[in-house]
């Protein structure tokens, strides 16, 4: 018997989850592409621009790899994303810096940082070859994407707009944390989900594990890294 065979319920769950990842990675590519254009408008260091462009290509590859897993699990759905759900509204000239700070903090300092811990957990129990190959590549890239976010924030704080950047980041952080907690099922923390070994082999895990990873990221990553930037992440977390 195929050790990665799925019953109908597990197959539907695996297919849906990997299709969701296809769409999430595609949207991330679009957001990063826009951020990179905004960095050009800010005349950011070229190494940051080049890093942004490389991340766009990474995210497109992640989307392709995720669709391969969806198909390997028996899925045949095509990606059907509404244009209105892709990317971000272009900012006016006076809103360019706030837009860059918002995306840097929420999508990279928060999103890509927790993604490293999440994908590490997803990969730990994954043995299905297509899913494992996808998670191997994604996890490797997410480390670089995380570092890009913190390097970008460091550069923003080194500019003459340092005080404005700090204020924008501090003001936006509580709401960004709130959205992150909702997205990663914080409300499920402490719940004991029934074991799902078949799904774990395909790179899935229960909501409570997502929430636990977020708590771990808060204490081990967000608090010390934002502290280096002069921002109190714990205060922002508790202000939600």
Image (tube, grey):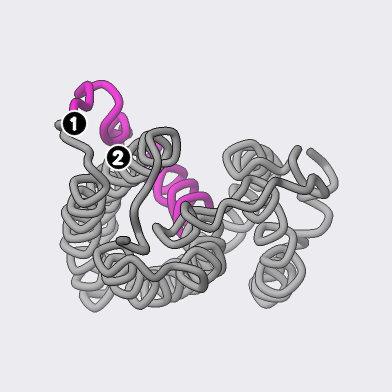
| Above-or-below relation of 135 to 93 | below
Can residue 160 be spotted in the picture? no
| Above-or-below relation of 72 to 124 | above
Q: Quadrant of the N terminus?
A: bottom left
Q: Earlier in the sequence, mark 1 or mark 2?
A: 2
- Between 229 and 145, which is closer to the camera in this rendering? 145
| Residue occupying the point 29% across, 41% down | 27
Gap in Å between the C-alphas at discs 1 and 2? 8 Å
Which residue is denoted by mark 1 in the rendering?
Answer: 77
Which residue is denoted by mark 2 in the rendering?
Answer: 19
Can residue 43 be spotted in the picture? yes
Few, some or many residues within 10 Å of mark 2 (<14, 14–19, 20+)? many
Q: Which region of the structure is painted magenta?
A: 80-109
| Residue occupying the point 60% across, 45% down | 184
214 sits left or right of 119 in the view: right
Q: Quadrant of the C terminus?
A: top right
Asked which secondary structure carries label 2, the reply is: helix
Residue 185 x, y percent position in the rendering: 65, 41
Which quarter of the picture shows residue 19? top left
Which quarter of the picture shows residue 214? bottom right
- Between 56 and 159, which is closer to the camera in this rendering? 56
- Between 191 and 102, which is closer to the camera in this rendering? 191
Residue 190 x, y percent position in the rendering: 83, 49
Is the C-beta separation of discs 1 and 2 under 8 Å? yes
Residue 16 x, y percent position in the rendering: 36, 36
93 sits left or right of 126 in the view: left
Q: Is residue 57 magenta?
A: no
Q: Residue 123 — which label? A: none
Extreme residue in the front direction: 1
Q: Is residue 95 magenta?
A: yes
Residue 224 x, y percent position in the rendering: 72, 75
């Amino acid at each position: 018997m195929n050790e990665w065979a799925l019953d109908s319920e597990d197959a539907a769950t695996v297919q849906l989850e990997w299709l969701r990842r296809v769409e999430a990675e595609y949207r991330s590519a679009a957001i990063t592409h826009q951020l990179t254009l905004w960095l050009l408008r800010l005349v950011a260091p070229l190494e940051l621009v080049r890093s942004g462009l490389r991340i766009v290509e990474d995210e497109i590859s992640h989307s392709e790899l995720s669709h391969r897993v969806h198909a390997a699990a028996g899925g045949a759905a095509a990606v059907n994303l509404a244009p209105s759900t892709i990317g971000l509204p272009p900012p006016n000239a006076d809103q360019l810096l706030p837009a860059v700070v918002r995306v840097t903090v929420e999508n990279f300092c928060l999103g890509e940082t927790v993604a490293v811990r999440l994908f590490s957990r997803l990969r730990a129990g994954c043995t299905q070859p297509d899913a494992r190959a996808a998670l191997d590549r994604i996890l490797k890239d997410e480390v670089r994407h995380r570092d890009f976010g913190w390097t970008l924030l460091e550069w923003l704080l080194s500019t003459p707009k340092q005080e404005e950047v700090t204020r924008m980041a501090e003001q936006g952080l509580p709401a960004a944390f709130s959205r992150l907690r909702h997205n990663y099922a914080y409300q499920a923390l402490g719940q004991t989900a029934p074991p799902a070994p078949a799904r774990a082999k395909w790179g899935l895990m229960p909501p409570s594990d997502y929430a636990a990873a977020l708590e771990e990221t808060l204490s081990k990553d967000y608090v010390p890294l934002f502290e280096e930037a002069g921002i109190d992440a714990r205060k922002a977390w508790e202000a939600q």
